[in-house]
């Protein structure tokens, strides 16, 4: 099939365009050989179309040319936006490639860690031992605080009620238990 573009068809249809840079089909060449269109009411053009119909065809042809120009502009805008989208897509593809490279490194590192878990198990054991030591120290500190509190309470009670207790305690119990109690604190 011969190569025909829109501009060659427009010019051969009587649109008034004289640009013929594109290849033209055989039917268009035969129309091109016919005499040019004359827009007069008195004489009919060489194609045998009455004047009023020829005017309507010329108007439609001009409208087609106008619409095709609008569509050409829109197509150019689409091409520009498509090229911008393609450049953004190329950038995204590049960034995805970089992420894949980093991910490969991380996968290798993960495999290495899985191959040598003893180091991490030992580290966890050391940390667990340190945590246990800290908890034991805290319990001992809390116990010492409670011992001091109870000693204070005992001394306070002895100070306040000492006369009463010291009069009754020797009668019923051996007083050495107070000394033992005080020695523990």
Image: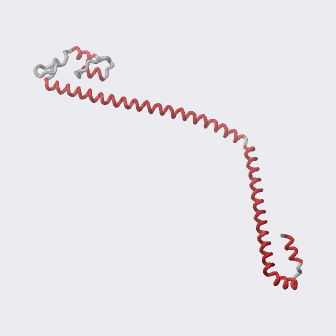
Pinpoint residue 169: horizontal percent, then vertical percent.
85, 83
Q: Looking at the image, which residue sits at the far front?
A: 159
Q: Quadrant of residue 14?
A: top left
Quarter containing the C terminus: bottom right
At x 77% / y 63%, what residue is drawn? 141
- Judge by depth and name the residue closer to the eye, 134 or 31: 134
At x 14% / y 26%, what residue is drawn? 52
- Judge by depth and name the residue closer to the eye, 49 or 17: 17
- Judge by depth and name the residue closer to the eye, 154 or 13: 154
Q: Looking at the image, which residue sits at the far top?
A: 33
Q: Looking at the image, which residue sits at the far left?
A: 42
At x 51% / y 34%, what residue is drawn? 92
Q: How many marks?
A: 0
In the image, residue 181 sits, relative to residue 106, either above or below, namely: below
In the image, residue 85 sits, relative to residue 39, either above or below, namely: below
- The answer to whether residue 84 is left or right of residue 7 is right
In the image, residue 179 sits, relative to residue 14, either above or below, namely: below
At x 76% / y 53%, what residue is drawn? 130
Pinpoint residue 60: horizontal percent, then vertical percent.
21, 28
Q: Quadrant of residue 68?
A: top left
Quarter containing the N terminus: top left
Pinpoint residue 9: horizontal percent, then vertical percent.
27, 21
- Judge by depth and name the residue closer to the eye, 169 or 157: 157
Colour scheme: secondary structure
- The answer to whether residue 108 is left or right of residue 5 is right
- The answer to whether residue 179 is left or right of residue 44 is right
Q: Quadrant of residue 51?
A: top left
Pinpoint residue 124: horizontal percent, then vertical percent.
73, 49
């Amino acid at each position: 099939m011969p190569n025909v573009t829109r501009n060659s068809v427009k010019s051969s249809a009587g649109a008034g365009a004289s640009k013929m840079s594109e290849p033209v089909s055989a039917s268009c060449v035969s129309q091109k050989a016919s005499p040019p269109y004359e827009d007069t009411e008195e004489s009919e053009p060489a194609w045998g179309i009455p004047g009023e119909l020829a005017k309507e065809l010329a108007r439609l042809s001009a409208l087609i040319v106008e619409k095709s120009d609008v569509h050409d502009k829109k197509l150019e805008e689409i091409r520009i936006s498509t090229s911008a989208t393609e450049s953004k897509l190329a950038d995204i593809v590049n960034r995805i490639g970089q992420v894949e490279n980093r991910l490969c490194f991380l996968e290798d590192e993960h495999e290495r860690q899985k191959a040598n878990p003893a180091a991490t198990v030992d580290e966890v054991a050391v940390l667990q031992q340190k945590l246990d030591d800290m908890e034991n120290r805290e319990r001992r500190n809390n116990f010492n605080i409670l011992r001091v509190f109870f000693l204070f309470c005992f001394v306070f009670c002895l100070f306040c009620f000492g006369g009463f207790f010291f009069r009754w305690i020797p009668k019923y119990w051996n007083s050495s238990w107070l000394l033992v109690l005080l020695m523990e604190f």
